[in-house]
Amino acid sequence: MNIKLELLKNHICGIIKSQLTDFEIDADEIADSTAIKALSEIQAILFNEEYSDFEIVDEIVEVFIRYGLDFGYQHEYC
């Protein structure tokens, strides 16, 4: 972990959050559409008969990474 980078990220996020106070965002709509996209990708992976079990898990982890979702620390990417 790069502490300077983490501090910079937190500072930038704070600035963005402060600017969005008067800006209306439908968080549910964004999350729902993102969730549907991620689930559709995972479903396609599960239906792909060319993948081995390991490849399926690997591909699903890639989907989680692509959408910035926490996939836990039980995978070799950590």
Image: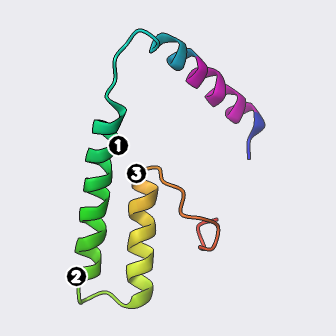
Disc 1 marks a residue whose amino acid type is: Ala
Mark 2: amino acid: Phe
Q: What residue type is labelled 3?
A: Tyr
Residue at the image point whose x is 57% and y is 25% from the top: 13
Residue holding disc 3 = 67
On the image, numbered disc 1 is attached to which residue?
31
Q: Which of marks 2 and 1 is in front?
A: 1
What secondary structure is the magenta-colored segment mainly?
helix
Q: How crowded is mark 1: few (under 14 residues within 10 Å), some or many (20 or more)?
A: few
Give the magenta part as a residue range: 4-14
**Among numbered discs 2 and 3, the one appearing first in the sequence:** 2
Which quadrant of the structure image shows residue 52? bottom left
Seen in the picture, residue 36 relative to 32 is either above or below; the reply is below
Q: Which mark is residue 47?
A: 2
Residue 20, horizontal then vertical, whole percent: 44, 15
SS type, badge 3:
loop
Return the disc, 2 or 1, that comes first in the chain's sequence: 1
Instruction: Give the residue at x 64% y 67%.
Output: 73
Residue at the spot 29% in from the left edge and 62% down from the top edge: 39
Q: Where is residue 48 in the image (x, y as percent from the top left)?
A: 23, 83
